[in-house]
Image: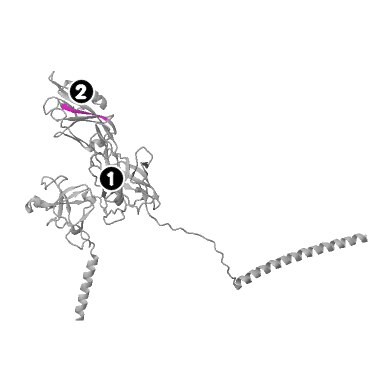
Amino acid sequence: MRDLKTIILILLLCAAGLVLLMPHSEAYERITQGSIVYINETYDISGVTGWAESLAWYGQYADVPDESVVPVVISLPGKTHTSEKSQYYYKINNYTFFEMPGKWFQYYGNNTASDETNGNLLAFKVERDVPVKFNETNVTGVISYEIIDNTSEVEKLPEPLLPEKHIADYLIARGDGLQFNTTGIGSTGLVNVWLFGRVDNIYDYHSVKSVIDINKSYIQKLETGTYSILLQSPIDNVSYFTVRYNTEKDSVEWFDPIQFDVFSMSVEGFSPQVVLDKLQGIFPQSRDTYTLQKMVLQDPSVSIMRVDEVYKNGTSVLDVRGYTNVANGTIISIVFDPDRQTPRTLRTHTYTGEAIRTSIGNMSYYRVYVPLNWDDIRPGVHTLKAFTQIGGEVFKDIVVSEMPADSYKPNATLKYIEDRNPWIPTPTPITVIKKEIQQVTVERTVVVNVTPSNEQVYTELFNVAKACLAVALIVVVIVGVGLYVRSVYVRGKKYGKKK
């Protein structure tokens, strides 16, 4: 009986130890088929994976598994509560899923279609934009961010976030491609693009299905600057061109319908601008026409044009807006006090939005909300760093001031305007209200009468006695010397009289 109790106690202790050793005791949201999941959030995906040991991604816009596409396949952890990784607490990892948004499907290898119908294979849909999360129970108004990649959910405003800023017919940032629809250009929408720069060029680039799509790898090789862009289209309603560039011979060839013959002109060694001039003389001899426009290629850049303190859901945030030359949809990030961040805190202090472009020749603009957690922000100068997904960055300083607790905070905003002195009030300066208890130390000099000890009395008497003895010795020496001098003088005087 005693041994049985011992065994039961050991089993109970082992069970308790297993419970304590479980790495995850928190219950996460259990998603259903097709649920939207967000980057760096953790979910219970055990109900959408079926018997699959892997997940597959067939492209951002794939609605069903496509057997003609080679999918990206990732392995799934098991369905257990005690392991470090589990489907019960599966993290939508930034490094795995950020570049592969869209629908993810159960994957059974070559037996995908025979195991289940395609509709039943859908697991979940990944989205990059994580809604801003506020702690609704925090009555002090301090924002509580518990997600790693804080992405601003930009409201669709009826008016632009900033005034439209036109640069050229086409504005491209190095690292982006050149894409535009050719419908409406010419009679058929069939278009070839010729690009002429100072030293670089792209000749006779064809549209496909009424779309020009010059890959960013081509744009990356071009120097920055202003380019002439020639859009070539047939005059007649035909599906071919009568002017073309021969890559092998480095020459321009064209068909002259009057002479009914094909002519050729070598452009080897010609600068792009000379080729453009020659080409403008050739087109009237052909059955093609052209439109000449301007394209500006720049290195990626971003600016901070305006910073307002606003309130969202009862909490203070900085509404940061600015311009950028990157393409529509490019991620724009804002870091609060980047020099004070460590690799561990950098992500939690980085907030993101997207570039919004209304015209291919205009600057994009963006909006990012930056939370103001007053418990972590001290008065003084702070820095905002803005940067784009493909490069380019800018730093702007903002000033946080602190006023006495009984100050009145006007119902106004404080704006930063580019090319003006920072933080000029419009119309009334904004003040940051924080209550603090100040401790003041007061110093006073107090005189206290203390009776000396016997040792202190003896020491003082000894010192006085030594001083008196020294004075007495000095007096004796002086008197002795005086008497000696007097005796010498008297003897000398007597000796003089005897002579």
Distance of label 2 from label 1 (alpha carbons): 53 Å
Q: Measured from the top left, where is residue 54 in percent x and y?
A: 15, 54
Question: Which residue is at a point 20% across and 75% down the rendered structure image?
Answer: 8
Residue at the outermost left position: 114
Q: Position of residue 158 (x, y in %)?
A: 23, 40
- Please name the residue that numbered disc 1 is placed on: 368
User: How many numbered discs, if any?
Assistant: 2
The residue that mark 2 highlights is: 265
Q: Which of the image's four quarters has the C terminus?
A: bottom right
Taking 266 as reference, is 93 above or below it? below
Which of discs 2 and 1 lies nearer the camera? The answer is: 1
Judging from the image, what secondary structure is the residue with disc 2 in? strand
Q: Would you identify the image quadrant in which residue 287 lies?
A: top left
Task: State the mark number for residue 280.
Answer: none
Say what amino acid the circle numbered 1 marks. Answer: Val
User: Could you tell me the amino acid type at mark 2?
Assistant: Met
120 horizontally vs 269: left or right: left
From the viewer's side, name the closer residue of 270 and 187.
Answer: 187
What segment is highlighted magenta in the picture? 227-233
Secondary structure of residue under mark 1:
strand
Q: Quarter-wise, where is residue 326 in the image?
A: top left
- Does the magenta segment cover residue 189? no
